[in-house]
Amino acid sequence: MTASSAGPRVRGAFFYHPHESEEAVAKVSPGEFIRQVRVETGRVHWPTRKETVATAIMVIIMTLLLAVFFFGVDAFFSSAVKYLLSFLG
């Protein structure tokens, strides 16, 4: 069974064999790299101010909700442990 018939190679803790040949990485000049970066940043969808504000508000609301939830869970377990420890004297 050859590598091409076995399908794509899986790289992970149990499947990677260090003796396998690595794929060649294309080497480019610094100028060409900068040009490629500019092209790629032109393709990025940059969020509008409205999208950024809406996302920030959602993050703040979810953070506050989780803070209240975990405060409640912590208070419950704290009370339960104090109650159980009160039996020890």
Image: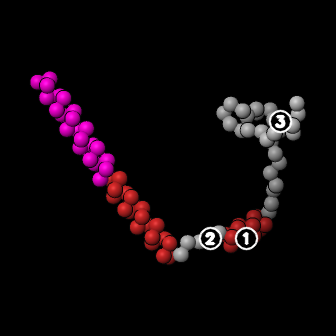
For residue 63, side relative to residue 43 (left or right): left
Q: How far apart are marks 2 and 1 (CA)?
A: 13 Å
- Residue beneath the point at 13% across and 29% down: 86
Tell me the amino acid under the disc marked 2. Answer: His
For the point 37% across and 57% down, the residue is: 63
Closer to the N terminus: mark 2 or mark 1?
Answer: 1
Residue drawn at x 23%, y 43% is 75
Mark 1, secondary structure of its residue: helix
For residue 47, above or below residue 25: below
Write the residue at 38% across / 62% down: 60
- Provide the residue designation for mark 1: 39
- Quadrant containing the N terminus in the rendered view: top right
Q: Which amino acid does label 3 sit on?
A: Ala
Spatial separation of the CA atoms under disc 3 and disc 1: 36 Å
Q: Name the residue that disc number 2 marks.
A: 45
Disc 3 versus disc 2: distance between alpha carbons?
38 Å
| Above or below, comparing residue 38 to residue 74 in the picture | below
Magenta stretch: includes residue 85: yes
- Going from N to C along the chain, the mark reached first, 3 or 2, is 3
Where in the figure is residue 61, as x and y percent of width and height?
37, 62
Give, as a single range, the part of the protein colored magenta.
Answer: 68-89
Quarter of the image for the C terminus: give it.
Answer: top left
Q: Measured from the top left, where is residue 41 in percent x and y?
A: 67, 69
Magenta stretch contains residue 67: no
First in sequence, mark 3 or 1: give its number.
3
What amino acid type is highlighted by mark number 1?
Answer: Val
Count of numbered marks = 3
Judging by the rendered image, the residue that carries numbered circle 3 is 6
Relative depth, front residue between 35 and 4: 4
